[in-house]
Image: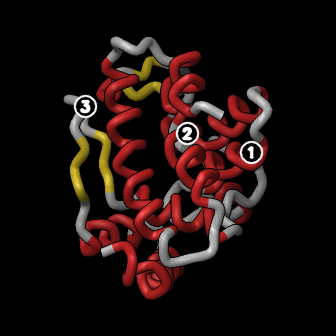
Amino acid sequence: MDAMEIIGKYYKTNSKAYTILVNHSRAVTEKALSIAEKFSVDKEFISEAAMLHDIGIFLTNTPNLDCHGSHPYIAHGYLGREILEKEGYPRHALVCERHTGVGITKEEIIKNKLPLPHRDMIPLTLEEKIIAYADKFFSKESDGSVRIRTVDEIIKDLSKYGVEKVKIFKEWIDIFEGAAL
């Protein structure tokens, strides 16, 4: 698989959206691979899936990221899943769907009337958790740069969604910190 070739099928390589996506994804990939060194995991898969985890953003209406689709940003995960399933990469597709926050449960989707399919979207495998964790540390910026986020910023953000989300993230810190920070 060539992740950049797949990205190139859906993004104009000279667009701001492409630059934003690729810069963010490279930062996430680098961090995920540094974490992966500590574990017996599929590093090639992590590299590919981390590069593709946000492929669905172009389908969202997020003008500051040069994305002019019709869906809300929160939908980019399941939209990315649909893209990668169509491309023949079902395992990579699950990373797209499951990386948002520390995961979203079916109950949360229904309770909060989120514009998402009614199913659990929780990272299950160690590879999925590594990518979701690494993703939290990098914000996409409208100029194409990537802003590094602190643990405190991430915890403050996650606390808006409940103490359980913060608890999961802190558990990930305990698991990954030796290789990640």
Mark 1 near mark 2, Cβ–Cβ under 8 Å? no
Secondary structure type for disc 1: loop
Decide: is 39 above or below 124: below
Q: Which quarter of the figure has residue 34? A: bottom left
Q: Observer-nearest residue: 77 or 1?
A: 1
Q: Observer-nearest residue: 77 or 178?
A: 178
Identify residue for label 1. 117
Q: Observer-nearest residue: 64 or 108?
A: 64
Find residue 33 and report its horizontal and vertical position in percent: 46, 60
Identify residue for label 3. 144
Find residue 25 and report its horizontal and vertical position in percent: 42, 42
- Residue drawn at x 33%, y 26% is 19
User: In which quadrant of the rendered image does the C terminus lie?
Assistant: bottom left
Identify residue for label 2. 52
Residue 81 shows in the view: yes
Find residue 69 and report its horizontal and vertical position in percent: 51, 19
Q: How far apart are marks 2 and 3 (CA)?
A: 17 Å
Q: Which of marks 3 and 1 is nearer the N terminus?
A: 1
Residue 163 shows in the view: no
Q: Which quarter of the figure has residue 84? A: top right
